[in-house]
Image (cartoon, rainbow, N blue to C red):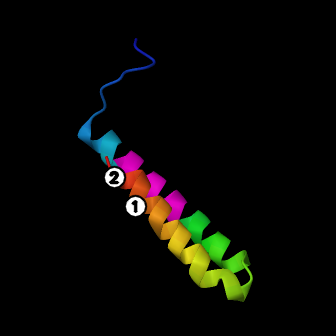
Amino acid sequence: MHLFLLEHSKTAYRADAVLYSAAVAALAGLLLWAAPPAQGLTLAACVLVGTLAWHTP
């Protein structure tokens, strides 16, 4: 039995993408909710740039 495989099925790949995207969205929402109102736009821009950089190959 192999515990660690480098190859994943399409379902596992999609599940990873959905779970990580949901985690990023939830943490970004929490960050924006907890931030001071004056910094909301700056933080939203940082979240957007970070997300784009993370998804860019």
- Element under label 2? loop
Residue at image location 65% in from the left, 71% down from the top: 30
Query: Of the residues shown, which amino acid type is indicated by label 1?
Result: Leu
- Which quadrant of the view contains residue 42? bottom right
Residue at image point 37% right, 53% down: 55
Name above or below for residue 8 compared with residue 17: above
Whether residue 37 is in magenta: the answer is no
| Disc 1: CA contacts within 10 A as few (<14), some (14-19) or many (>=20) | few
Q: Secondary structure of the magenta portion, mostly? A: helix
Q: Residue 52, which numbered label?
A: 1
Residue most toward the left?
10
Disc 2 marks a residue whose amino acid type is: Thr
User: Residue 56, labelled with which disc?
Assistant: 2
Q: Is residue 16 depicted above or below 21 in this figure? A: above
Q: Tell me whether the residue at label 1 lies in contact with that at label 2, contact meaning CB atoms closer than 8 angstroms.
A: yes
Of residues 51 and 23, the one drawn nearer to the viewer in this rendering: 51
- Residue at the spot x=40%, y=11% of the render? 1
Which of 19 and 36 lies nearest the eye of the viewer?
36
Image coordinates for residue 6, horizontal then vertical, percent = 35, 23
**Magenta residues, as a range?**
15-25
